[in-house]
Amino acid sequence: MEPSEFRQHGYAVIDWIADYLEAPDKWPVLPDVRPGDLSRSLPTSPPDQGEAMDVLLRDFQRLIVPATTHWNHPGFLAYFANSSTAAGVLGEALAAALNVNAMLWRTSPAATELELRTLDWLRQMLGLPDKFLGVIGDTASSNTLYALAAAREIHPELQIRAEGMAGRADLPKVAVYCSEEAHSSVDKSAMTLGLGLAALRKIPTDKRLRMDVGALEDAVDKDIRAGTVPLAVVATVGTTSTTAIDPVPEIADVCDRARMWLHVDASYGGSAAILPEMRHLLDGCDRAASLVVNPHKWLFTPMDCSVLYTSRPELLKRAFQLIPDYLVVSEGNEVVNLMDYGVALGRRFRALKLWFVIRNLGVEGLQALIRQHIRIAQMLARWVDDEPSFERLADVNFSTVVFRHRPPEMQADKVDSHNAAIMEYVNATREVYISHTRVRGRYALRIAIGNVHTTEAHVRRAFELIKEAGARE
Ligand code: PLP
């Protein structure tokens, strides 16, 4: 592509993005498509000759945008939001242009040093002590996997790095603990690392869906008595289903006593700790060996950007550092080579977008957004509480409200399907997108406010639609 042509299309793309971010509700939040619709519109084989860029951009608008679920839409209230700010989009574009691979310091000093500095800023924003080193990965799932791989290294006598875990008569059983409300990525980590799901102990939760520390202690003691090595506890600050907060200080005590790695999954909830009034959410996390937080969830940074902090970087390195001859460099210990902290050799320049977001919005700008989301969630919780036919099923610890419609005359066994029908009705309007969960088996509607464009009016509209559906269904 000639530079002049690139310029022309580049300007057109930026214009399109500017219009999009100005009015992300121009398209329905959920596309009006059925499985296979887009596939049927796409050629089944690639073009032999190159096509003009304006044809591609037309197809992007004609085919791709209408088949997209618009996570940027202010009515996106499902799961946990991933919404980006303009600064983040520009950072992503520039990272694509530089296209560095930050595997070694030498292969991109800027990407390496900016990652370390930006994550040190974020560490300060979260109130974590400076013993934590941060590295960026793609997702919390990968980062939890890496943390648990490092956890195995607190027991070097197990020789897992060298000998693996398969078919070893000399290897005692090992165990990892998390609450029954922990994210499925913990299960996947156990599966992937060769621990197996049998090594994962799902600890019961208390009334507020927080890990029951007494039950954790009992499970650890039982394992020790049986000769099993307790490796790690994954505590969650902001569980996926109801945003419950596990009692991290007490869990840290149990970890200390049994020499276990404490990993904190604060993928969603961690961002709230940038508010001084919410800092207490991370109480006890200073004692963690690792903590994951996702700027791509609630810090307005484009997908993907998940941060793994660790106070034991040497163990993360012991789990993953492997330097083939062709990657030996002369800088030695003077530098950080990011390839040493995970599975991936190649690393994108993800820090640039986060650096742009933090600088462009400033800490105060980010705080204002998060504070606003928490305020709207509290408001929604009050609306729910004020309606006698609705019941809230969980505390609102952050910006997520979990509730259900339960008219007094309705038979108990109809309530789940009634709420499932409400969700379908609401989402079929394509005005808002809400999701569901189960709380102790009960089907619940779930509204998570975290999108940079969402205002009180959007949440009010979602609740109106829910009430309308409740009256109809
Ligand atoms: N942990 C928690 C508490 C989550 O809520 C989620 C996703 O919502 C994850 C982990 C997985 O995040 P990722 O998509 O970055 O792997």
Image: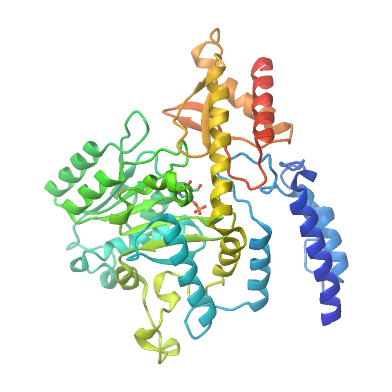
Marks counted in the figure total 0
Q: Position of residue 236 (x, y in %)?
A: 38, 46
Q: In screen coordinates, is 39 left or right of 282?
A: right
34 versus 446 height, above or below: below
Q: Residue furthest top?
A: 409
Look at the image and name its color scheme. Answer: rainbow
| Residue 5 drawn above or below residue 430 | below
User: Residue 44: where, in percent of width, then height?
Assistant: 78, 61
In the image, 240 versus 301, the foreground residue is: 301
| Observer able to see residue 416 | no
Does residue 290 appear to the left or right of 139 in the view shown?
Answer: left
Residue 413 % position (x, y): 50, 15
Quarter occupied by residue 192 = bottom left
Question: What is the residue that sits farthest to the bottom in this orientation?
Answer: 330
- Asked if one can make out residue 224 in the rendered structure from this viewpoint, the answer is yes
Identify the residue shown where x is 56% and y is 71%: 348
The residue drawn where x is 29% and y is 67% is 164
Is 398 positioned to the left or the right of 368 in the image?
left
User: In the rendered image, which quarter is residue 305 located in?
Assistant: bottom right
Q: Residue at x 23, y 69 (%)?
A: 159
Question: Quadrant of the image for the N terminus?
Answer: bottom right
| Left or right: 31, with 356 as reference point | right
At x 68%, y 66%, the residue is 90
The x and y percentages for residue 158 are 20, 65
Q: Which quadrant would the C terminus be assigned to in this image?
A: top right
Location of residue 144 by image quarter? bottom left
Tell which of 78 and 413 is nearer to you. 78
